[in-house]
Image (cartoon, rainbow, N blue to C red):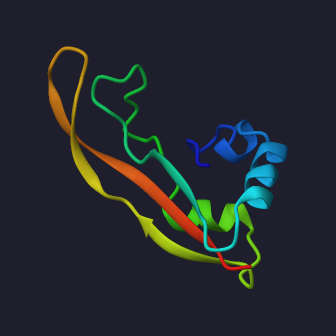
Amino acid sequence: MSGCEGSTSRTDQLSRADLEVQRRVLTPGGVLLIVDHGSVRPWAWNTDPGTRFPSPEDIYDELALDTARWTPQRLATPQRVATGPGGQTATVTDTVVAVRRLA
């Protein structure tokens, strides 16, 4: 649900119709989980240090969910060590958005 600044957002890349179906079919108590890149891997083809990844809060806001029916469970940017194709390692950031359907 995110994207680099100046590009089409993931919300636009994902079909809005598909997202709406996912929202409708998720039963009350269920969790909609979005995990995305939050940083550039050093071995990526695009290593522009100016690349901006939206925060979890940006992504949550972009979803425009009815707060009477949805509540955020986790908006986070955890870091982890990833291994590249040549065996090199780097600390990368993920973006995690988890929202629970209330009704």
Image position of 17 with respect to 32: above or below: above
- Image location (x, y in percent) of residue 49: 37, 38
Q: Is residue 78 left or right of residue 50?
A: left
Q: Quick one: 41 or 85, which is closer to the camera? A: 85
Question: Quick one: 11 or 69, which is closer to the camera?
Answer: 69
Horizontally, residue 16 falls left or right of residue 38, namely: right
- Residue drawn at point x = 45 percent, y = 70 percent: 74
Residue occupying the point 67% across, 79% down: 102
Q: Residue furthest left?
A: 88
Considering only vertical position in the picture, is 46 above or below 77? above
- When the figure is inspected, residue 39 is found, relative to residue 103, above or below; the finding is above
Image spot of residue 39 (x, y percent): 37, 44
Tell me the quarter of the picture where residue 58 sits. bottom right
Q: Residue furthest bottom?
A: 68
Residue drawn at the location 58% of the way across and 68% of the way down? 99
Q: Nearer the viewer, residue 42 or 100?
A: 100
Please identify the quarter of the rendering in which residue 57 is found: bottom right
Residue 43, how many percent across, how many down? 29, 23
Residue 28, picture quadrant: bottom right
Q: Where the C terminus falls, by quadrant?
A: bottom right
Residue found 38% across the figure and 49% down from its top: 94
For this view, does 82 lie left or right of residue 10?
left
| Number of dots carrying numbers | 0
